[in-house]
Amino acid sequence: MAHKHKSDGVSLPKLLFTIFLNILITIAQLIGGIVSGSLALISDAIHNFSDSVSVILAYFAQVLSQKPVTRKSTFGYKRAEILAAFINALALIGISVFLVFEAVDRFQNPMEIDARWMFWLGVLGLFANGISVLVLEREKNKNLNIKAAYLHLMGDALTSLAVILGAVLIWVFKIYWADPLITILISIYLFIHTIKLLKESVTILMQMAPIDLEVSDIENRMMQNQSIKNIHHIHVWNLTDKLIHFECHIELKDDIRVSETNEIFESINKVLNDEFDIGHLTIQFEYRSGHINLCAE
């Protein structure tokens, strides 16, 4: 039976637009951070740079995932999106840890900061990242890869807001330790929100059972079919964050014809699709030593 794997399309021009915005912000904030001496502004620039990389990865993963299925790649290139999400998550965690160390050093060795640069570039970053977040708002739940890019941009918008707050504290009250403090708070925020994304992507790449799916619930529901004697060799995993695959061996109570096994299969397929959102099903029917393979999507 031939299969066609659908893709949750995401607007590629929207991704290109966010890439362009982030590159501009990165250049502006990096120059401003060096001139003003603000670690928070430099951290925002680094975060923006990671955003640019993440959205570029998201763009190419999206293009790759839309390539047709071939005999060499029988499931297509869906996992490219998950791999991109995994790389993005690792990058964010690494950046978060790096910025914490830099902020601790700045606490020990404080320096004067030109808050004017910090403030206005923070405003620019907030404005541009806010636009990028709005652009991807409707796309964020289409796949894990776009969600990763969206979280990057959302985190950077909040980072820019924190930079503005720090600039005000330094400009008005001369509280220079606000700069490394805000950097640490930003890093902690990024770390916490990225761990969940990393866990989700690893679960899919390792072909583990979906986090929110209980295999025993599926088995119990299938056993309600009166033709089934037992179920074994159960395997369930995500091909992507949206497509769940399920396969198993089913021993039948009676030695029935092939056409009758097809009726049982269609009944099970409907139940698993409707109640558990399983999009691809493969079953090997058995009666004592014989077996019949059926699959559907």
Image: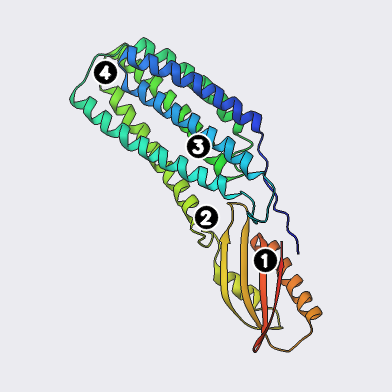
Q: Which residue is mark 3?
A: 151
Q: Earlier in the sequence, mark 4 or mark 1?
A: 4
**Placement of 65 over or under 173, stated as above or below:** below
In three-dimensional space, the C-alpha distance between marks 4 and 1, rounded to whole angstroms, equals 61 Å
Mark 3: secondary structure: helix
* Amino acid identity at mark 3: Leu
> Local crowd at mark 1 within 10 Å, few (<14), some, or many (≥20)?
many
Image location (x, y in percent) of residue 277: 66, 59
Residue picked out by circle 1: 281
Quarter of the figure with the C terminus = bottom right
In space, the residues marked 3 and 1 are separated at their CA atoms by: 32 Å
Q: Residue furthest left?
A: 108
Residue 211 location in percent, x, y?
Answer: 51, 58
Label number found at residue 230: none
Viewer-side label of 4, 1? 1
Name the amino acid type tagged 2. Answer: Ile
- Mark 2 and mark 3: Cα distance apart in space: 19 Å
Q: Secondary structure at mark 2?
A: helix
Name the residue at 23% across, 17% down.
111
Vertical position of residue 240 compared to residue 41: above or below:
below
N-term-proximal mark, 3 vs 1: 3
The reply to whether dot 3 and dot 4 touch (C-beta < 8 Å) is no
Q: CA distance from mark 4 to mark 2?
A: 46 Å
Label pair 3/1, CB-CB below 8 angstroms: no
Nearest to N terminus: mark 4 or mark 2: 4
Q: Earlier in the sequence, mark 2 or mark 3?
A: 3
- Mark nearest the camera among 3 and 4 is 3
Choose between 58 and 110: the one closer to the eye: 58
Q: Which residue is mark 4?
A: 175
Task: State the quadrant of the N terminus.
Answer: bottom right
Q: Which residue is mark 2?
A: 204
